[in-house]
Image (cartoon, grey):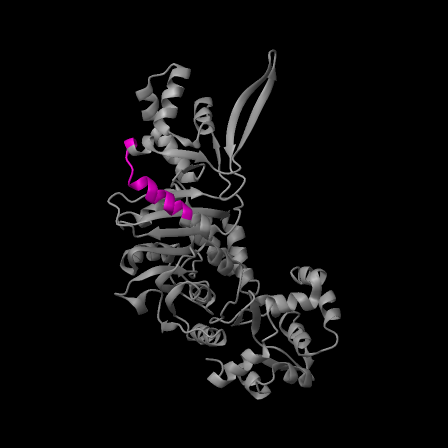
Amino acid sequence: MLFTDKGVEQLRTALREYTASGIADRLGEVATAAVSRNDFRAALRATADRDPLATLIRLFVCGQTESTAAVEAALAPLPLADALAAGLVVPDGDGLRQGLDLEAYGDSWWVLADLPATAHPGVPLAPDHVLGVGGASTTLAGATIRRPVGSALDLGTGCGVQALHLAQHATTVTATDVSERALSFAATNAALNDLSWELLRGDMVAPVAGRRFDLVVSNPPFVVGPGTATHAYRDSGRAGDGISAELAAAAPGLLTEGGTMQYLANWAHVAGEEWGDRVAGWVAGTGLSAWVIQREVADPVSYVDLWLTDAGEPHDPARRAAWLDWFDAHKIEAVGFGLITLRRAGADDPVVRVEDLRQQVAGPLGAQVAAWFDRQDFLRVRDAAAILAGRYRAADGLQLRQEATMGPEGWAVDRQVLAMPQGLRWSEEVDPLVLALVGGCDGQVPLRDQIAVLAVAHEVAEQDLAEAAVPIVAHLVERGVLLPEG
C-alpha cells in the first residue's frame, strides 16, 4: 500500500467532506458544470477562502499549487511527511501540488491513481502508469450486470475501479494485475474505502488458474497492434486482438455454472472477412452463450493517433508509420470497440449473437444486458408450441414510424418501423402483417389465437402463418420489442 494502515485511516478522516456531493454543494451548479469542461475559474472563486475542503478541491480537482500550511491543514490528521512520502502531494516552488490523482468517486468512494497525461502536457506516461477513473472503466462499470453473486473476479484491476463496484454485490472479490504498482494502488483504494479484496499479481488469468467465479469482469489492455508492450495499462504484449480472443478462450475454465464474464474488447476488421464472424469464432466450441455488441469503429489512422496521444508520447513519425504499416500488412481496415458478455448456462445449443449497437442506450447498459440474457433463458426452454401458447405485450412506449411518398392517389406507405424510445432503442422494419401481430399483443390473448384471427383476415393458412410467426416473435422477444406476459 501507499500508506500504513494508520495512514489510510488518517487520510479517510481528512477526506470525510471530500465527496462528490460535498464538492458539488461547495461549488454550486454553475461551477460544477464548468469543471466538467475543464474550466476551473468559477471553482477557484468558490474556494478562495482556503478552508480544508476548499484546499482539497483546489489541489485535486483544479490542479492548483497551494501553500504548504494550507495543504497540511487540509490533510490533517495525516502527517504531511506521510503524504509527501506516498507521493500524494509534491513540492512545487514555494508550495505543494497534487502528485497523484485523488477522485471523489460516487458519494462514498475515493480513488487514488497516477495523474493523467493532461496533468503534464508533453511528458509521456511511465511504462507502469496506473489509470484512474476514465471512459473505459466507467463504460464497463455501467455495462456490468449488478446482481448478487458469491464470488467475483476483476482481471487486470489497475487501481481497482471495477473491484469497488463488485464489492457492492459480491460476497468475495478477487483482483489480479501484472503490475506491482497497480496492485499497490488497488490495495490502498480497498483500504481507503474500508473494503477487503484478494489481490494477486500475475498476467491476467494466470494467478487464478483452476479457480471458478460467479462473475468475471475485465478492462484489459486491449489495444490492437504489433504486440509491442510499452505501457502496461494498454499493451498486453499479444499481437493484434489476441488478448480479447484469449479471454474468451479462458472463460469456460473461469466460470461457475450460471456464471457470467464481461469485458471490454477491441477487434480487428480484416479485409475480406466479416468482423462478426471473427469474433464469434473466439466463442465457438466454448459451450458458452455470448452477446457481443460493437459500440464504436475507428479507422487505423485515428486509432493509432488516439493511443499515441493517450500516453502523452512525443511525436514520432517513424513509430506511427510502423504501427500503420503493421495494420496494412495484416489487412486491418478498421478497429471495433465493444463489450463481450459470456454466460455459462449449461445449454446444449448456446446462443451467440454478434451485432452493432451504435445507438445511444437509455439507462445503465448492465440492466439491459441482464434482461437480454433473461429473455434468452425464456426462449431457450420453449419450442414452437410453447411460444405459440404464450401471451405477449408490446414494450412500453413502443412507437410506429412510417415513411410515405405522395402519389396520384395520396400518401403511399413505403416503410414501417417499430422503434423503442427506451432501453436499447432498437428499431425494426416490419411488414403490415407483423405490425398487426404486434398491435394485438396486449398480454391477454395467446399468440396462437392471434394468429388464427390474422390468418382469416389475411386469407392465409393458419399453420403456414404460425410457422412463419414463431421465429419473428422469438426475434422480437430477444430484442425486447415484445415481452412475455407472466
Nearer-the-camera pick, 22 or 211: 22
Find out whether residue 383 is within the magenta segment: yes
Q: In this view, does 19 lie to the left or right of 479?
A: right
- Seen at 75% across and 74% down, the residue is 48
User: How far across and how far down the image is residue 420, in percent?
Assistant: 51, 38
Q: With 64 as the anchor, is 254 left or right in this view?
A: left
On the image, the x and y values in percent for residue 293 come to: 43, 46
Q: Give the range drawn in magenta.
A: 371-385
Tell me which corner region of the image, top left, top right, bottom left or bottom right, holds residue 252.
Answer: bottom left
In front here: 223 or 157? 157
As drawn, the residue found furthest toward the left would be: 348
Q: Give the percent coordinates (x, y) of residue 62.
A: 66, 70
> In the depicted view, which residue is nearer to us: 440 or 159?
440
Q: In this view, does 470 lie to the left or right of 59?
A: left
Does the rendering let one see residue 268?
no
In the depicted structure, whether residue 184 falls above or below residue 148: below
Residue 19 appears anywhere in the view: yes
